Image (cartoon, rainbow, N blue to C red):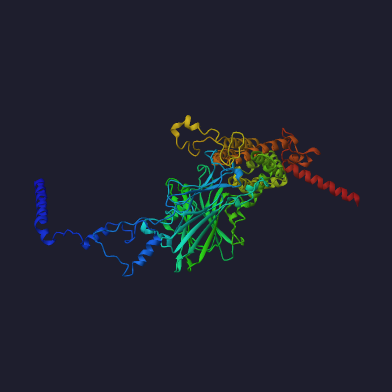
């Protein structure tokens, strides 16, 4: 029954629709008339077929300036031709940009002996930089040591190109042809090995824009360390010049794209990945640093909260060992500076690709005026001596303080001292691995008095353990009396239980400072030692272990450890545990035994935590542990007299009622014997006084 009703409904609906279209619609809407030759409607229809962004009246084969002149001449009545509606005007072509095809330009060289520190590649499309490669043999790709390191590249995940410049006044005129100043091909006006000038003219001829990139050739014959001292070789001078060639006032601004394709090295073990760093000039002409990580920028893209309109000191993208910074010659150029997300890594946002955008203030030009905005672009290793010379103004009068991007943590003084010592040792011909060992010897040698005091305290503590056990039996669960008696015992034998912690606290800043220094020193990147090819990364003695034996654990490998086997952290933890068992006094009760077990577990936990630390830091730990073991053994052999201070002074001169232990040391005498000894000594003193009288 339901199916019949449904079929009847469908049949009636189709019939009603056919009847409406056949009998009602022709009376309501008459058919459209076909246009005839010479009918103006025909010209209107043809005009509609033109692309909507193309302006009618533009003639084929003419450049934009000639088209504007022709259109102006056509305004007079005598110059207007008779309309020809039966011949529609052809669609206009693109403006005659010279050249109209892509041109590639290369500055510098990949030859380290050329005098250039890098090779820079540019494209005429948007007059942008496509590649920035360092030619220093020390700065190679970690994955492929034969290839130079690329500071700037063109990743496939984006169409953005480094230092492309969107100019609003040009974009408005290029819009009818589907072009922008970033997609149009700029003409190469001048070029040599150290500079290139790109030029783009406005289609109406009212103004033109030039972008000049220039680099420097450095004489390396006089100084073998010039690459570590001369910042100019790592700089690109970017000049943006706008010239008003028209008859009216020009107002234009631009959006400068920051560096794109900054490499992400050793992402699984790196301490830091990509960061956005900006230094703005405050009211006191000081530069205030702000740092945003990649995951913070991913979150910021939804809120758009982070942007700066103050005077700019510098801005750039920062990695662990390298950076690309823009420094304007006048900090008032930018009106708005903000980070930019290039490609998001959904699984690990901290590994996302980021960049920046800089929007300028409006440039006002009268007819015939020219204005240039200059930027210094630094791209190279993060060294303080290279970052300090960056400055603003024609004579670098305003400090940029770009060295702020060097992050040495809260113990920056210790870290810089460590780096200075490592560089000094390396400068006299010592490898960085041996320099770290020498650094360990220097540090532990300076701390020898404290270590000796710690060793003596540990020996005292071993000898006092039986007496502490007796006190525990005597006072039982009375913790207050037990603590008071224990402190009296320590005071009597001149033992400070906190003295053993002092060397540990003093080594903590050294450990943190060295860890920070190793993570920030570009010289330790790719520094070899034995089988290790990079002291700034884990040693990875057997990278293919899990690929061959445990393939089912791929691609992540073991939990917390990953697919690589790092040997040095395991040796470090083994030495820690051995050192702890060798010198820790034996437990006297279950509580101390439990504490020592917990310490062993903590060592294993530390091993997991330190599994990905740089190999150079593990070299320091191993050398420090071996030094500590040898130092303690040496003190045991020397048997210093201070270690025997636990025995009472009268033990070797007068008999007492105390009992002698197996080792020859005296146990504490009882209270009655001690009282009798005190009373007899007082009687002898009184007799002596009476005789003298």
**What is the x, y in percent for residue 172?**
40, 61
Residue furthest to the front: 78
Foreground residue among 261 and 132: 132
Left or right: 126 in relation to 35: right
Number of marks drawn: 0
Q: Is residue 77 left or right of residue 21?
A: right
Residue 681: where, in percent of width, then height? 81, 45
Residue lying furthest bottom in this view? 77
Q: Is residue 538 visible?
A: yes
Q: Position of residue 335 (x, y in %)?
A: 49, 63
Report the front residue among 515 and 19.
19
- Residue 559 or 364: which is nearer the viewer? 364
- Residue 485 in sight from this viewpoint: no
Residue situated in front as seen by the camera: 539 or 338: 338
- Image position, residue 141 (x, y; %): 54, 41
Which residue lies most toward the top here?
549
């Amino acid at each position: 029954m339901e199916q019949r009703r449904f079929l009847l409904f469908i049949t009636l609906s189709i019939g009603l629709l056919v009847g409406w279209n056949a009998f009602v619609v022709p009376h309501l809407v008459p058919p459209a008339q076909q246009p005839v030759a010479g009918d103006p409607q025909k010209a209107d229809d043809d005009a509609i077929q033109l692309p909507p962004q193309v302006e009618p009246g533009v003639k084929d084969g003419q450049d934009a300036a000639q088209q504007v002149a022709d259109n102006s001449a056509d305004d007079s009545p005598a110059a207007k031709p008779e309309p020809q509606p039966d011949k529609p005007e052809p669609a206009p072509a693109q403006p005659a940009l010279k050249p109209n095809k892509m041109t590639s330009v290369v500055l510098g060289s990949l030859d380290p002996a050329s005098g250039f520190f890098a090779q820079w590649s540019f494209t005429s499309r948007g007059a942008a930089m496509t590649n920035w490669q360092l030619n220093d043999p020390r700065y190679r790709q970690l994955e492929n040591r034969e290839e130079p390191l690329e500071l700037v590249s063109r990743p496939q995940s984006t169409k953005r190109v480094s230092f492309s410049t969107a100019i609003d006044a040009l974009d408005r005129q290029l819009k009818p042809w589907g072009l922008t100043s970033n997609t149009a091909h700029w003409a190469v006006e001048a070029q040599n090995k150290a500079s290139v000038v790109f030029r783009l003219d406005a289609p109406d001829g009212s103004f033109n824009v030039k972008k000049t990139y220039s680099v420097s050739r450095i004489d390396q014959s006089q100084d073998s360390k010039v690459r570590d001292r001369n910042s100019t070789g790592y700089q690109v001078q970017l000049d943006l010049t706008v010239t008003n060639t028209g008859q009216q006032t020009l107002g234009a601004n631009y959006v400068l794209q920051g560096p794109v394709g900054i490499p992400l090295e050793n992402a699984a073990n790196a301490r830091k990945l990509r960061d956005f760093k900006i230094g703005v000039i405050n009211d006191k002409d000081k530069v205030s640093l702000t740092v945003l990580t990649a995951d913070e920028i991913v979150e910021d893209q939804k809120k758009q909260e982070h942007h700066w309109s103050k005077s700019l000191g510098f801005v750039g993208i920062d990695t662990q060992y390298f950076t690309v910074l823009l420094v304007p010659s006048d900090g008032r150029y930018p009106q708005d500076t903000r980070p930019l997300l290039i490609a998001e890594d959904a699984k690990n946002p901290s590994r996302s690709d980021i960049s920046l955008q800089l929007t300028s203030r409006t440039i006002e030009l009268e007819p015939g005026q020219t204005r240039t905005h200059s930027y210094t672009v630094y791209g190279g290793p993060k060294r303080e001596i290279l970052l300090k010379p960056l400055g603003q103004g024609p004579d670098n009068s305003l400090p940029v303080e770009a060295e702020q991007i060097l992050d040495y943590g809260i113990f920056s003084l210790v870290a810089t001292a460590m780096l200075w010592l490592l560089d000094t040792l390396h400068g006299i011909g010592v490898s960085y691995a041996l320099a770290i060992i020498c650094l360990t010897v220097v540090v532990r040698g300076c701390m020898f008095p404290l270590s000796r005091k710690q060793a003596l305290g540990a020996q005292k503590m071993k000898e006092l353990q039986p007496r502490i056990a007796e006190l525990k039996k005597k006072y039982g669960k009375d913790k207050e009396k037990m603590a008071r008696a224990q402190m009296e015992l320590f005071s009597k034998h001149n033992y400070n239980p906190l003295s053993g912690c002092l060397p540990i606290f003093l080594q903590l800043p050294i450990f943190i400072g060295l860890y920070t220094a190793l993570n920030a020193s570009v010289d330790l990147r790719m520094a070899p030692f034995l089988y290790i090819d990079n002291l700034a990364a884990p040693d990875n003695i057997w990278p293919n272990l899990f690929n061959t034996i445990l393939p089912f654990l791929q691609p992540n490998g073991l939990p917390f450890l990953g697919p690589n086997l790092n040997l040095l952290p395991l040796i470090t933890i083994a030495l820690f545990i051995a050192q702890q068992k060798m010198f820790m006094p034996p437990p006297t009760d279950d509580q101390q035994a439990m504490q020592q077990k917990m310490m062993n577990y903590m060592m294993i936990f530390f091993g997991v935590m330190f599994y990905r630390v740089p190999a150079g830091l593990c070299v320091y730990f191993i050398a420090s542990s071996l030094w500590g073991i040898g130092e303690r053994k040496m003190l045991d052999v020397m048997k210093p007299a201070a270690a025997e201070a636990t025995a009472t002074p009268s033990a070797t001169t007068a008999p007492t009622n105390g009992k002698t232990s197996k080792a020859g040391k005296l146990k504490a005498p009882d209270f009655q014997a001690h009282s009798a000894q005190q009373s007899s000594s007082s009687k002898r003193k009184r007799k002596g006084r009476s005789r003298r009288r």
